[in-house]
């Protein structure tokens, strides 16, 4: 169903008085960590982020995510709908959504009649909503591909967060939206690019897996031709967080292994990991004959996921030769989004590589 209006915002999680009091203590702890990291930043050597500014901010973000509960983090952030509403209003854009019968919603940037589509899945560990910076990055990609604004539309999928529904609900929603695009809205698979960052990159890989190896709990989706492409930004390919880079890059990145471990447990609800939600364990043959033309994966050398990315890239490149991998020196997890968040003038090598690839596939 197409809906040009925006519904009343979804309510934020309710916090008990003790949770609110604890949130104040948490914010104090974050401020304290920032001060301590600022004092120690000149002595960080190669263990920390490349600049003092990044080092202090990344320390603060890591502490916030480690110290807060998921409900507290959702409480202090705008939800998907609020972020989208404010984003389009600030830019004088016309709001437009795609809504499925089960309540799944995707928010559009661009015109409904555009023949080409970027179907985007945001990151946030399956626990946090899309941010303004996700929308900024997505708009940048769409505008770069289609400066005239008539041939490419982007859809940001507001999948259920892990505190509401656990795996495989998010994959079911992603497949249902792709099905809707093709079989209801009449978009050709060859004019659709799947894209996602972090947990969203995990979802992109899960959708590609489902197209080749249907998930037993999700309706099969047959497509008549290959998808145009798949764009992966710092995809979360290993939910177990056992790689050595989790320790080695712990003081350089914006996210911590303990946070990812906690969020992965909420997402899976204790169920065993599988090839859909933990793609690094899928064998080589699993990735052969994917229903997609080209793939690009961009990530940062300073990520705690770095070892997982390098290991997964070797498998994917061997099984699907039209895969491009970019590992940017001195860049953190989801750098194009994080750099926008902290106001850097340059959005980094990952941003440049992804933008160039998307323009080539417009």
Image (tube, rainbow, N blue to C red):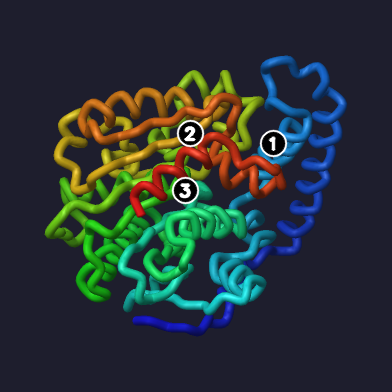
Q: Are marks 2 and 3 in contact (CB under 8 Å)?
A: no
**Would you identify the image quadrant in which residue 250 lies?**
top right
Which element carries disc 1, helix, strand or loop? Answer: helix
Left or right position of 97 against 190: right
Pick whichever of labels 2 and 1 is earlier in the sequence: 1
The image shows residue 105 at horizontal and vertical percentages of: 42, 71
Q: Disc 1 versus disc 3: distance between alpha carbons?
A: 23 Å
Report which residue position mark 1 lands on.
58
Is residue 72 among what the camera can see? yes
Pick whichever of labels 2 and 3 is earlier in the sequence: 3
Q: Point out which mark residue 299 bears.
A: 2
Pick whichever of labels 1 and 3 is earlier in the sequence: 1
Quadrant position of the C terminus in the picture: bottom left
Which residue sits at x=60%, y=54%? 133
The image shows residue 150 at horizontal and vertical percentages of: 41, 70
Left or right position of 187 against 38: left
Mark 3 surroundings: few (<14), some (14-19) or many (≥20) residues within 10 A: many
- Classify 176 as above or below 335: below
Which element carries disc 3, helix, strand or loop? Answer: helix
Is residue 265 among what the camera can see? no
Q: Nearer the viewer, mark 2 or mark 3?
A: 2
Which element carries disc 2, helix, strand or loop? Answer: strand
Report which residue position mark 3 lands on.
266
Q: Nearer the viewer, mark 1 or mark 3?
A: 1
């Amino acid at each position: 169903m197409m809906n040009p209006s925006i519904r009343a915002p979804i309510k934020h999680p309710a916090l008990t008085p003790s949770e609110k009091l604890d949130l104040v203590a948490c914010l104090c702890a974050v401020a304290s960590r920032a001060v301590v990291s600022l004092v120690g930043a000149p002595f960080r050597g190669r263990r920390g982020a490349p600049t003092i500014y990044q080092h202090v901010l990344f320390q603060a973000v890591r502490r916030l995510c480690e110290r807060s509960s998921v409900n507290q983090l959702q409480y202090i952030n705008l939800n998907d709908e609020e972020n989208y509403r404010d984003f389009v209003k600030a830019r004088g854009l016309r709001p437009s959504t795609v809504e499925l019968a089960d309540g799944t919603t995707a928010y559009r940037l661009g015109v409904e009649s555009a023949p080409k589509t970027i179907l985007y899945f945001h990151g946030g560990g399956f626990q946090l909503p899309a941010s303004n910076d996700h929308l900024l990055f997505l708009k940048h990609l769409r505008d770069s591909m289609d400066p005239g604004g008539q041939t490419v539309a982007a859809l940001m999928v507001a999948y259920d967060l892990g505190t509401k529904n656990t795996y495989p609900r998010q994959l079911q929603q992603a497949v249902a939206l792709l099905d809707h695009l093709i079989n209801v809205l009449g978009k050709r698979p060859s004019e659709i690019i799947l894209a996602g960052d972090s947990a969203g990159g995990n979802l992109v890989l899960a959708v590609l897996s489902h197209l080749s190896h249907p998930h037993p709990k999700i309706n099969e989706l047959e497509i008549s031709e290959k998808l145009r492409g798949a764009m992966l930004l710092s995809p979360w390919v290993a939910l177990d967080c056992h790689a050595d880079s989790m320790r080695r890059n712990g003081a350089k990145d914006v996210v911590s292994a303990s946070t990812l471990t906690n969020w992965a447990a909420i997402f899976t609800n204790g169920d065993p990991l599988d090839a859909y939600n933990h793609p690094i364990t899928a064998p080589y043959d699993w990735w052969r004959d994917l229903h997609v033309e080209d793939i690009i994966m961009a990530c940062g050398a300073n990520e705690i996921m770095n070892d997982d990315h390098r290991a997964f890239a070797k498998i994917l490149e061997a099984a699907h030769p039209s895969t491009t991998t970019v590992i940017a020196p001195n860049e953190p997890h989801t750098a194009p989004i994080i750099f926008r968040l902290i106001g850097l003038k340059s959005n980094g090598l990952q941003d440049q590589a992804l933008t160039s690839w998307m323009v080539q596939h417009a």
